[in-house]
Image (cartoon, helix red, strand yellow):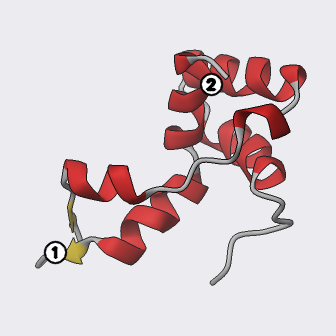
Amino acid sequence: MGSASTRGLLLSKVAEAFVTAYAVKMRGGTLRFQAQYLRRIRVPDPLEISKVGCIALADAFDRRDVAAATRVALRAYGLTELPE
């Protein structure tokens, strides 16, 4: 999995859910976003993500398409939907 596909994972709502779980929500609803929270995100084993999935994540990142990145990330994490 290349860096563009990793960025695609980080663009997804799945990664946002990880950060939201760790981060402090500040007044106004914004998250206090720090590098330490990104380091806590568990990335799926790159060998478990298909080549097509990696390409789709990279493409989603290049287009800044959060919905597309989220669809692929859900499959990569073995999820059908994001928990509420």
Nearer to me, 1 or 26:
1
Q: Quadrant of the N terminus?
A: top right
Q: Residue at x 86, y 66 (%)?
A: 80
Secondary structure beneath disc 2?
helix
Expressed as whole percent of the image width and height from the top left, the position of residue 12 reads 58, 46
Vertical placement of residue 59 versus 43, above or below: above
Mark sitting on residue 61:
none
**Horizontal relation, residue 16 to residue 1: left or right:** left
Q: Residue at x 47, y 65 (%)?
A: 18
Work out how far the residue at label 1 is from the one at label 2, CA to CA, in angstroms: 31 Å
Residue picked out by circle 2: 5
Q: Quadrant of the C terminus?
A: bottom right
Report how many numbered discs are placed on residues in the image.
Answer: 2
| Picture quadrant where residue 50 is located | top right
**Horizontal relation, residue 26 to residue 37: left or right:** left
Expressed as whole percent of the image width and height from the top left, the position of residue 62 reads 56, 15
**Horizontal relation, residue 40 to residue 55: left or right:** left
Residue picked out by circle 1: 28
Tag in front: 1 or 2 = 2
Q: Amino acid at mark 1?
A: Gly
Vertical placement of residue 12 versus 60, above or below: below
Q: Residue at x 22, y 66 (%)?
A: 30
Nearer to me, 19 or 71:
19
Label located before the other in sequence (1 or 2): 2
